[in-house]
Amino acid sequence: MAFAAYIRDCRERLRQQDRRYSLRQTAQRVGMQPAYLSKIERGDFPPPSEEKIRLIAEDLGEDCDVLLAMAGKVSQDLQEIIRARPALFAKLIRALRSAPDDKVEEIAREIRDGEW
């Protein structure tokens, strides 16, 4: 699903249970004009900045990295990590490309919890 349709769907689902997720109120909480958010949700405008996507993700209870990826963006912190060791991270990401999700999770857990 495209970024625009996804965030609209998420917001509309939340709005069915909580009126605070109207377009106008959501836009106000994330610091945008309602017309601008509407145009983003319809796909008339490209996805907003990383900062605004982070605010939208937080407000809608969605994963920021997922929304950034859907918007065709990579978070600034990940860019900095990759730039620090580009060849190593390129090799790692390419090696993980076809790995099943559970194996990628296992590797991430091992790295996170391991002692270096």
Image (cartoon, rainbow, N blue to C red):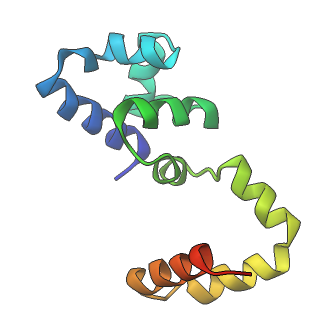
Give percent across and percent down for residue 94: 64, 84
Residue pictured at 28% horizontal, 38% vertical: 10
Where 88 falls versus 67 (above or below)?
Answer: below
Between residues 9 and 43, which one lies in front from this camera angle? 9
Q: Residue furthest right?
A: 84
Q: Position of residue 24 (x, y in %)?
A: 34, 10
Instruction: Report the side of 111 relative to 28 (left or right).
Output: right
Q: Residue at x 62, y 81 (%)?
A: 114
Indicate the position of residue 65 as horizontal and vertical percent values.
52, 52
Can residue 94 be seen in this snapshot? Answer: yes
Q: Is residue 61 above or below residue 86?
A: above
Q: Is 86 displayed left or right of 52 in the figure? A: right
Residue 100 appears in which quarter of the rendering?
Answer: bottom left
Q: Position of residue 34 (x, y in %)?
A: 41, 12
Instruction: Residue at 55% x, 76% y: name it.
Output: 108
The C terminus is located in which quarter? bottom right
Q: Between 106 and 63, which is closer to the camera in this rendering?
A: 106
User: From what the image shows, is residue 41 above or below residue 90?
Assistant: above
